[in-house]
Amino acid sequence: MPDHILTVNAGSSSVKFQVFKAEGEALELDLKAQIDGIGTQAKIRATDANGAIVADRALAQTEAGNVAEALDTTAKWLRERYDVEPAAIGHRVVHGGPKYSRPVFVDANVLADLERFVPLAPLHQPNNLAPIRTILERYPDRPQVACFDTAFHHEHSAVAKHFALPEQFFAEGVRRYGFHGLSYEYIAERLKDVAPDYARARVIVAHLGSGASMCALFEGRSVESTMGFTALDGLPMGTRPGQIDPGVVLYLFAQKRMDVDAVQRFLYNECGLRGLSGISNDVRELERSSEPAAAFALEYFVYRVALYAGTLAAALGGVDAFVFTAGIGENSASIRAKVAKKLAWLGAALDSAANAKHATTISRSDSRVALYVIPTDEELMIARHTLALLAGRKVPS
Ligand code: AMP
């Protein structure tokens, strides 16, 4: 019988699960499920490997009143309906702190370590750790693996990792970490198949989703990221502003008399495309809108992607390829076209027909920068790491 790997990506009120069948080193997606509205009006929606809906129903308060109950409900459902008992569970964990440079098996000691990084990611880390703790309590023998969004950036140079602050802050963990590492690691792997000539070249990857960042890859390794200490930095996002002058934060405290919680809520939930447009955080809606503010928010987004392309090109000493990925990068031909136009000074030339079809290669043959659209798959990356640790090996990277 094949082994199954369960991946868990837990947020504050939603948990995403995927079940992979493992035969040897090969992984095949079996099921995707998402529980939304945990603690309020929870519902589960699940699809099989072909995208057919296999569950779509509201859950009772007792089935998903909190993340632990949602996990129990999922485990029961997998056992009863699919006869699946996962051999191991892989978790997305946003922060590995200064310590963890690769995925690890989690026991009580590692969990205590990861809890120390909660102040570095107060909105994400507690949600990521909650299901690990629950499973550790209920099924202490079930192998669990934590896969970190920061790990892929761990080898950044000292100048890339530092802020210009007194050194004691760096020692405390106030560093530029970089996030979306599982996505970038997956893309670096995919490049070996999709564009082997560029897999070891100077590549900028733009992960443009509701969270957005960009990464500079050299020889398949991350050398720079637009995100720093938290997932607030860098590009504007659905509801986060991206890079702003820290003086603005001082202004919020001093002039607007906001407290820490209010500033945190504001920066994570009320800014970015939503704040700027006053209409929506969703690029689809902004693209459909005829309001000038919607067009301006999109123009701002494109402008910042292009600005950061310049920054990352400087880190790499030039750029050979540029990859678009995640929700916006994979689906918005219009955003890609506008970004490509702004990269003309780097030698980028878009093939408009290929771009409109969302082809994998969207640059013309005379483009000095190869342009690609490569769908990301963070869950598969988690499953690969989990399976590899289970088999006692490292994922080659
Ligand atoms: P992600 O976080 O990677 O799932 O990306 C989610 C975001 O991708 C959504 O909020 C949308 O802004 C954007 N998106 C998804 N589909 C499309 C589409 N067809 N066209 C434009 N933007 C899209």
Image (spheres, helix red, strand yellow):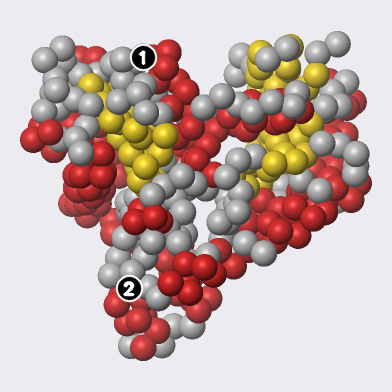
Instruction: Label 1, secondary structure: give it.
Output: loop
Q: Quadrant of residue 356?
A: top left
Asked if residue 61 can be seen in this view, the reply is: no
Given residues 99 and 216, the one toward you in this image is: 99
Residue under the point 34% across and 15% down: 195
Q: Give the amino acid at mark 2.
A: Pro
Residues packed near mark 2 inside 10 Å, few (<14), some (14 to 19) or many (20 plus): few
Q: Ligand 1: which quarter?
A: top left
Q: Earlier in the sequence, mark 2 or mark 1?
A: 1
Residue under the point 29% across and 77% down: 247
In the image, farthest residue toward the left: 345
Q: Mark 2 or mark 1: which is in front?
A: 1
Position in image of residue 193 (x %, y %): 42, 13
Query: Horizontal placement of 154 versus 22: left or right?
Result: left
Given residues 154 and 69, the one toward you in this image is: 154
Quadrant the N terminus occupies? top right
Residue located beneath label 1 in the image:
196
Given residues 241 and 243, the one toward you in this image is: 243
Position in image of residue 244 (x %, y %): 30, 65
Residue under the point 47% across and 67% down: 170
Q: Could you say which disc has been placed on residue 246 in the image?
A: 2
Position in image of residue 81 (x %, y %): 85, 23
Residues packed near mark 1 inside 10 Å, few (<14), some (14 to 19) or many (20 plus): few
Q: Quadrant of residue 116?
A: bottom right
Position in image of residue 221 (x %, y %): 42, 34
- For the residues labelled 2 and 1, the Cα–Cα distance comes to 41 Å
Query: Horizontal placement of 308 versus 31: left or right?
Result: left
Given residues 308 and 280, the one toward you in this image is: 308
Q: Give the amino acid at mark 1.
A: Pro
